[in-house]
Amino acid sequence: MDENKYIQDIICGLGLAINDKNNCEIIINYPIKFNKKSMQYEMNSEYKIFIQPIGSFLADFLNTDFNKYEDFLYFFSKYSLSLIDYNKMLKLFKESNCEQKKFEDFITDLLNKNKNLFNKLQNQTDIILDYCYLNPNKIANNYKAIERLYVLRRISPNLTLLNENKAAYYSVNLFSSYPGESEKQIYEFLSQKNSKITEFDLILPYNISAILYKSICSILKQDVYLKVCKNCKKYFISTNKATNYCSNIAPGETKKTCKEIGRKNVFENSKNEDPIIFSYYQVYNRKAMMKSRYPDIQKYIEDFEKYSKIGKNKLAKYKNNKISAEEFQKWIKKNS
Ligand SMILES: [Zn+2]
């Protein structure tokens, strides 16, 4: 097979292929830029390939507000071939250029045509993730997330996302560089130290539903994790379950990512975890335990209620530097 054949197939498909074994998505696009001088949009005539964890398309799709032009434009710039045919791209960008108004009208048109479908798919994804992953009902609770998906698929014909997932399967192998043409040349190539052959199993989805379905399966099998960033509150994909911040540029920042900002916040918060607050909660927890252990003894109930009521006030004052550390500490001791 020609080394570039699979790339051509991806370009003629949705500009996206999935490599299941390595849990990644391969995206191919032709970068589009606005040229301020000529006031035209320009398309790069050379394609660009980038690789991201599987599920990243899904996260981007869920983060896009399809009622907003800017959101859709951003999504389009990354996944243009998933949204329009390669030949249409060529038509739109005659000699790699497209006038500003023509391009913007085209995007608005494309959005209007697809808005309902994309909103519907977002809703369905919510329903599916909710059933399988976040909040399963009582009967479903004892089963694995991926098993719940298979059950949901059988009982919910209306969830089209679960049933419109056609894809082509590819097995390709790539030589690490040009191996030559004849049998002898290729074996000679292989006898060299740094020559390698890599095998790929690729899935080429036929439509956006198929991409989303495959991504949902990966999340439910915990090959990757769908997380909500604690800073920007957007979805992101992580290969590490414990990660809480995404690597995108944080809102209101020009260079710093949410990850960097998040670390700073953790540091700021840890400053608050001082030993006095710790001892306040120690006493609090002990009193709460006594109250629940001896619910008939009035003394424990009153003791806890007094401590928590006044304590909450003292704690807030201490945090806002309205009372001194000594004063707060003294109060805790007196009431412990
Ligand atoms: Zn973030």
Image (cartoon, rainbow, N blue to C red):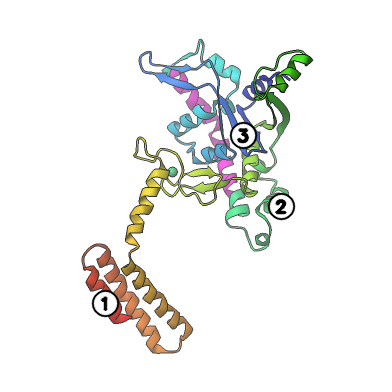
Q: Is mark 3 within 8 Å of ligand 1?
A: no
* Marks 1/3: CA–CA distance: 62 Å
Q: Judge the density around disc 2: few (<14), some (14-19), many (≥20) Cα neighbours within 10 Å.
A: few
Task: From this view, report whether residue 161 is shown above or below residue 277.
Answer: above
Q: Residue at x 22, y 73 (%)?
A: 327
Please report contact status of discs 1 and 2: CB closer than 8 Å, yes or no: no
How far apart marks 1 and 2 lie (CA) works out to 58 Å
Q: In the rendered image, which residue does mark 2 sit on?
A: 151
Magenta-span inclusion, residue 23: no
The verdict on residue 123 being magenta is: yes
Q: Secondary structure at mark 1?
A: helix
Of all residues shown, which one is farthest toward the right? Answer: 183
Residue 110 drawn at (x, y percent): 53, 27
Tell me, yes or no, whether the two marked residues, 2 and 3, touch with CB atoms within 8 Å.
no
Give the dominant element type of the magenta stretch: helix, strand or loop.
helix
> Which residue lies at the image location 45% right of the left edge and 23% below the top edge?
104
- Going by the image, does 70 lie left or right of 133? left
Of labels 1 and 3, earlier in sequence is: 3
What residue would you read off at disc 1?
A: 331
Residue drawn at 36 percent across, 58 percent down: 270
Helix, strand or loop at disc 2? Answer: helix
Region rendered in magenta: 101-127
Q: Amino acid at mark 2?
A: Val
Callout 1 amino acid: Trp
Determine crowd level at label 3: few under 14, some 14-19, many 20+ residues with C-alpha closer than 10 A.
many
Amino acid type, label 3 = Ile
- Residue under numbered circle 3: 208
In the image, residue 173 above or below residue 122: above
Which quadrant would residue 52 be assigned to in this image?
top right
